[in-house]
Image (spheres, rainbow, N blue to C red):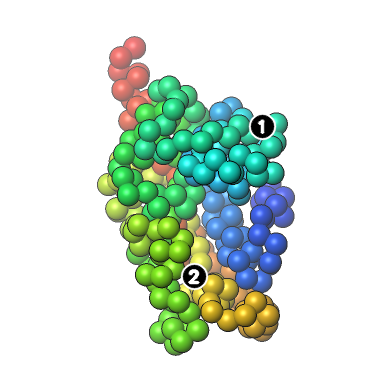
Amino acid sequence: MYKAPLNHFLSKNPFSRPLTQGFFYREKMRAIHRIAPDQNFRKILEVGGGQSGLTALLYPQAKVTNLDLNSEYSQAPCNQQEQVSFVCGDATALPFNDDSFDAITMFDVLEHIPQHEKAVSEALRVLRPSGFLLVSTPNENWRFPYYEFMKPICPSDTDVMAEWGHVRRGYTLDELKNLIGLYCQSYATFINPVTVICHDIAFSHLSLLKREFLCALLSPITWLSYIQHKPEAKGTETASIWQNRAKLLLKNSNL
C-alpha cells in the first residue's frame, strides 16, 4: 500500500483531545482517506498545509512540499521531516514549474482564499497530466451553530468565519465542479447532523471542562453516528478528488 492504512493514519491525528476538536478532525481524516487513491505518488504539493502535515501522514513514502503563507510554520514538527519541504508562498502564485506534481492537496483552504479561481488555476498548472487534486471544504449545509437551540452557548457563524479566516461559507458539489473543471472521481461528506452537535459544543463559549463533559455524555450517539455515516450521506463538509484527465487528453492529442 502506498496510502497509509486507515487505523495508522487516524492514530496520527494532530489534535490531542479525542472528544472535542480531535474527534472532528478524525471525521475529516476518515473522509479524506476514503477518497484518496492508493497510488505511488512521488511528488505531492500540499497547499496551505500549515502545521498539520496531513498529506505526509496520508502518503508517508511521497516527497511532500508544504506551501503556506505563514513562514512561522516552517518550524512546525511536521515540516522537519526528511520527506517534507516547507515553502513560504502564495496559493495564487505558485513558485513551481508547470506539471511539477503527481498530486495536489488543498484541505480546508479554498474557503480562505478570496481569489479561489486563481488558486485553482495555479494548482492545475503545476499538476501533471492524469494527476489528482484532493480537496476538502465546508459545503452548503455548513452553519454555526447548526441547530437554533445551540445559539445561546455559541458564537455566531459570522464571528466564527472571521475567527477562522473564512471568506465564504462553503461550496456545493456543483460549485466545486464549476470552479475546478475536472472530473470528480469520488467524494465523501463528514460532520453529519448528529456529530455536529458535539462539534458545535467543542467550539462554544463553554469552559473546556464543560465542553469535554457534554461531549463525553453524548459520545455514545456521536460514535454510533460516526460509525454508521456513509460517504454520500448528509454532512456539513465534503472531501473530494478530481483527476486531471483534460490535460492528459491534450497531451496525448499532441503526440
Residue farthest front in this picture? 72
Residue 104 spot, x, y in % from top left: 48, 37
Residue occupied by mark 2: 192
The reply, left or right, for residue 182 in relation to residue 160 is left
Q: Is residue 232 visible?
A: no
> Tag 1: Cα neighbours inside 10 Å, few (<14), some, or many (≥20)?
some
Kindly identify the residue that appears in the image at 35 percent across and 62 percent down. 169
Q: Quadrant of the C terminus?
A: top left
Total marks in image = 2
Kindly identify the residue that appears in the image at 41 percent across and 64 percent down. 161
Tell me which label, 2 or 1, sits earlier in the chain.
1
> Tag 2: Cα neighbours inside 10 Å, few (<14), some, or many (≥20)?
many
In the rendered image of this protein, does residue 105 appear above or below residue 85?
A: below
Kindly indicate the quadrant of the structure image that contains residue 145. Answer: bottom left
In the rendered image of this protein, does residue 80 appear above or below residue 140?
A: above
Q: Amino acid at mark 2?
A: Asn
In depth, the one of 44 and 88 nearer the eye is 88
The reply, left or right, for residue 146 in relation to residue 37 is left
Kindly indicate the quadrant of the structure image that contains residue 121. Answer: top left
Residue 214 badge: none
Kindly identify the residue that appears in the image at 46 percent across and 87 percent down. 152
Depth-wise, is mark 2 or mark 1 nearer the camera? 1
Residue 186 spot, x, y in % from top left: 44, 49
Helix, strand or loop for disc 2: loop
Q: CA distance from mark 2 to mark 1?
A: 34 Å
Kindly identify the residue that appears in the image at 40 percent across and 52 percent down. 112
Q: Quadrant of the N terminus?
A: top right
Q: Amino acid at mark 1?
A: Gln
Residue 83 badge: 1
Residue 157 spot, x, y in % from top left: 40, 72
